[in-house]
Image (tube, grey):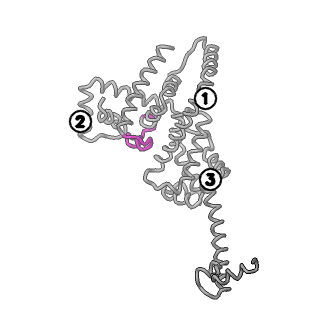
Amino acid sequence: MNKDFHILPDIELLKRSRDGDVTAFRELVKRYESKVAATVIGMLGQCDEADDIGQETFIRFYHALKAFRGDSSIGTYVTRIAINLSLNELKRRERRRFLFTRIDLEKEQGESAVENGAVRFEEKDILRRALESLTPKFRAVVNLRLAEGYSTEETAEILQIPVGTVLSRLQRAQKQLQLILKDYKEGF
Amino acid sequence: MEDSLYNLLLRSFDAPLTENEQRRFEDALETSAEFRAMREEVVRLRSDLHTVHGSSFRPFFAERVMNRLNSSPQPISEYFFASFRSVAIGSAILVIILSAYNISRENSFTVDSALGIHHQTLEQILALETPFE
């Protein structure tokens, strides 16, 4: 019986989950895990907090099952929860940043200097750092629209902002990324 | 860059454009250096973003969610609703039993008898007060 869950459509899994069938909900988690992972890891980076936020996303979704009316798709709905939780986590990080920035910088510089005799970053790291230096609202549009492939309208729906705002934030984010990347490349 | 043109540029990566949109897209590519530069930038950024994004959680993610779900406490609103429901049902049964008892004692089917209210006359009340004089 459980083997058949993977062929059931979302709407049936949703109905069964609402009736308390945890196996049906588990199938929904498996189905949307990668979507939530892309959002959360895109926003927070690959870290323990990302896994926690991913779990929390599905727990919130489970508790909201009865309230979920299906106005938007499950993917859009869980992504919206994931984005909101990630933005909250980034705010928490921002508050902690003051304490840890100096320690991290010293540690990183020390490690790189030992390994290479000079501070050197890979292209991938440069882009990751550039993304991390964007403000959370800019990072959210870049991740959703350019990395995860949501349409402009879907991005607007997830972030609950007008389509025009998505486009203007995206253009500004792109310009900021260009500047940051240029600085990184010239600096290192 | 104009929002609609920028959106057209982004949409060109998602799905085929309509004939009109395609014409507008090609015109912009031909005539606008800014559009061409922006397109190149978007192409580069999209490909970079795909290499940067490792998009999977640690193994057994679904199991961790289900374990947390099984061990996580009920949300406070649901807890109160669930608690209140049992209290409300118990109270309602008690009220019905008491009302039935009162009605059976009074032998009249009225609200007052169900609630066990006895109407007293002024004389009865005064008679009650006499012992204190």
Disc 3 designates what residue?
B76
Position in image of residue A11 (x %, y %) = 48, 57
Q: Amino acid at mark 3?
A: Ile
The crowd level at tag 1 (other Cα within 10 Å; few <14, some 14-19, many 20+) is few
Please tell me whether mark 1 sits on a helix, a strand or a loop: helix
* A133 vs B60, nearest the viewer: A133
**Chain ID of residue with mark 1:** A
Residue B112 lies in quadrant: bottom right
Work out whether A6 lies above or below B116. above
Residue B58 picture quarter: top right
Going by the numbered disc 1, the residue's amino acid type is Arg
Distance (Cα) linking label 1 and label 2? 51 Å
Secondary element type, mark 3:
helix
Q: Which residue is mark 1?
A: A96
**Residue B23's disc number:** 2
- Kindly identify the residue that appears in the image at 36 percent across and 32 percent down: A168
Residue extending farthest to the top is A117
Does label 3 or label 2 sit earlier along the sequence? 2
- Say above or below: A119 vs A139: above
Stretch of the chain drawn in magenta: A146-162
